[in-house]
Amino acid sequence: MQDSSRLERALELVEKDVNIAGFAGPIPNSLLARQDLEAAIVVLSDRQTPLRDRIVRQVGNGAAHLWNQRTSLTDWASGAAYANNLVSLFYTDGAIPPQLDPNFVQKTAAYKFLGVTGVITGPMLAAGRSYADIEAEIAESSLRAVIQNEEWAIFNGSSAINSLSFDGYDTQLTTNVSTLAGAALVANGTNIPAIDKLIKLTRLQGNSRLDGLYLSFGLQNVVNQIVATATRYFVNNDASASSLVAGDNVVTYASALGPIPIIGDFFCNSSSPYPANAQGSSGPQGFYTSTIYALRHDEQGSAMVDLMPLGRTELAKIADSVRFYINEYTVLAVKAEPWNAMLINVSDPIV
């Protein structure tokens, strides 16, 4: 009994000695240090997050992100007797030039919190010790789940449906939204007029670049088939059989704005059957329509703003288990809304 009392007092001394002095400092083995996982994402296999891999990320602060969003190319002062065009910049001798106010609106959005907790029991760790690192596998699958949830939300997130989510492109884009009303993509040769229209709409708002055309895997196949019908093959009978190729994979759309990457993404079809989707599948092929996104995601177009980047924090050990969580605080900020576009309700083939 006496030994037990002495042990408890010793434990109390140890507990009092634990502090968070090294939390924000350079000490790498500080008890509460959080492991930054952004670099680990690059080598994570099968992450299926092409937009998250490409979109610019910025450092946030405060409880919410505040930014000025460009809404059009020009805007005149309220009550000015001028047409909204650049020709009206001419003025008479001795007069004052027309007043031009930059057309921005101030936007704000609270940071949203994404994360998952991993728990691995002691027996599970022991059972897998001889052939697999169970903890590493759980950590990898948890990391993949978080970034894929973010990828889905970047496209489809809506705070009106789920107050815990940030608003994605589906919610934030309103200017350049075109619809096919369930019809299929059609082509004029290898040009696709519906996509050309999206590009033109952004150009008419002063846009000078697009960083990607994001579309579902089904629509990616449609684009491939459009190009395949206009492709000619020359077969050299003397060549080896390995030189014969079937099919086409279109990786770039040649537009009046220049070459734009064509990028297939699971989450452009909001009801994709992939396990990480947040709406549930409407069937083994997803929903019968989906969206094509023409996006500019550099510093001027749109960005993910991180109050706290993706990382891993160890939790206290409870019973015979290892516990940790992987999380981030982030929000999507569309800086120039008219420089992005969406083609909605596009027939998405199920075969």
Image: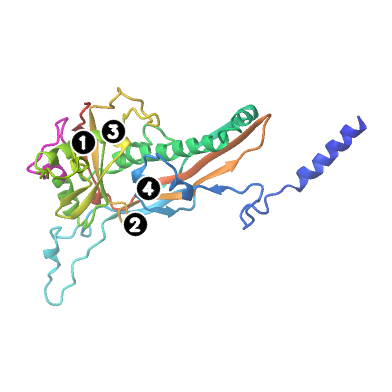
Say which element carries label 2.
loop
Residue where numbered disc 3 is placed: 269
Question: Distance from label 2 to label 3 (Cα)?
Answer: 26 Å
Query: Looking at the picture, how far across and down is residue 84, in whole percent?
Result: 15, 58
**Which tag is nearer the camera, tag 4 or tag 3?**
4
In this picture, residue 11 sits left or right of residue 180: right
Magenta extent? 180-195
Q: Which residue is mark 2?
A: 299
Identify the disc placed on residue 149: none
Whether pointer 1 and pointer 3 mark residues with C-beta atoms closer than 8 Å, the reply is no
Q: Look at the image and name its color scheme.
A: rainbow
Q: Is residue 75 visible?
A: no
Mark 3 burial class by Cα count in 10 Å: few <14, some 14-19, many 20+? many
In the picture, measured across the screen, residue 119 lies left or right of residue 279, that is right
> Which quarter shows the C terminus?
top left
Residue positioned most to the top: 283
User: Label 1's element?
Assistant: helix
The image quarter in which residue 86 lies: bottom left
Q: Which residue position is annotated with label 4?
A: 53
**Circle nearer the viewer, 1 or 4:** 1
User: Please, is residue 61 above or below residue 138 in the view?
Assistant: below
The mark that comes first in sequence, 1 or 3, is 1
Assess whether mark 3 and mark 4 are in contact (beta carbons under 8 angstroms).
no
The chief SS type of the magenta part is loop
Q: Amino acid at mark 1?
A: Asn
Mark before the other along the chain sequence, 1 or 2: 1
Numbered badge on residue 221: 1
Residue 131 picture location, percent across and down: 56, 33
The tag earlier along the polypeptide, 1 or 4, is: 4
Dot placed on the residue nearer the N-terminal end, 4 or 3: 4
Q: Judge by depth and name the residue closer to the eye, 247 or 60.
A: 247
